[in-house]
Image: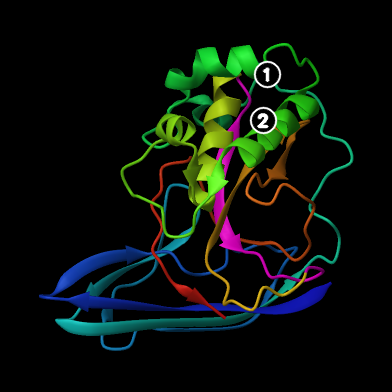
Amino acid sequence: MLTVRVGCNIHFECESSATAILLVNPRFDSDHPIRHENLDFGRALKSEPFADADGNIAYRVILETGLNEIRHDALVEVSADSDKSDQFGDAPSVATLEPAFLRYLLPSRYCDSDRLFAFAQEKFGSIFDAGERVQAISDWVHNNIEYRFGSGRPDISAAQVVDRGYGVCRDFAHCTIALCRALNLPARYVTGHLPDIGHIDPGLPMDFHAYSEVYLGGKWHVFDARYNEPRISRYSEIAAGGVTSRLNATRF
């Protein structure tokens, strides 16, 4: 196991008092315990934390007029092993898939798999092995969607990203999820922390990073089309059904 430091500084400039729902904590995972954590809402007034529909801890915060600064700092334990599986297992049958997982097959606001059905069938429908099919989807997104820092928009869907050909990590994740769901492969959106351990330090502060997980062989597997290579020390913050719009923040 490795111990890594994660955190963020988020600034809100408000013309009047406003209420926001924030999800900034690392997701609770008994296999990756949090050794230390501090969350400071500054001038903002916070309510009691609550668990959302995906089991994430959220905070409803009342922001004050003017500058509000929220700071989060934590030490977490992560695996030193690669996040890439050697064996993916079979795709689940829709007829027998546990009801709780059925929602990961549905189109959503950002993962509009219904609009990408014909495209997904044409590009990946002839690949019968489930793991190879998902990897082919990740390869396609990685090779055909250009990463453009700062190009993210809160109103764009996966099909629109495929049409325009560029986006940020959130868009890479949404495209992967939508293409998987179009082929009846349960997929969900995850965001969190991805330190540059084992990679050349780019010299820039980390940001929130978004990627996807696909349910194969009875477990969730990471597929990160933005980087499309095995990584270590990945730590999940939020797991969701693919309907999300992230805040900009500076990572430690």
Residue type beneath disc 1: Phe
Q: Quadrant of the N terminus?
A: bottom right
Check disc 1: other Cα within 10 Å, few if <14, some if 14-19, many if 20+.
Answer: some
Residue type beneath disc 2: Ile
Residue 36, by quadrant, is bottom right
| Residue hosting label 2 | 137
Along the line of sight, the residue nearer the viewer: 238 or 14 = 14
Q: Residue 11, position in %: x, y? A: 33, 79
Callout 2: helix, strand or loop?
helix
Count of labels in the image: 2
Callout 1: helix, strand or loop?
helix
* Observer able to see residue 99: no
What is the CA distance from the residue labelled 2 to the residue labelled 1? 7 Å
Q: Look at the picture and state if 154 lies above or below 66.
A: above
Q: Is tag 2's residue or tag 1's residue first in the polypeptide sequence? A: 1
Q: Residue 148, position in %: x, y? A: 49, 54
For image coordinates 65% across by 44% down, the residue present is: 225
For image coordinates 60% across by 36% down, the residue present is: 144
Q: Look at the picture and state if 210 lies above or below 207.
A: above
* Observer able to see residue 185: yes
Report the magenta residues as a range. 184-199
For image coordinates 78% across by 68% down, the residue present is: 199
| Residue hosting label 1 | 124
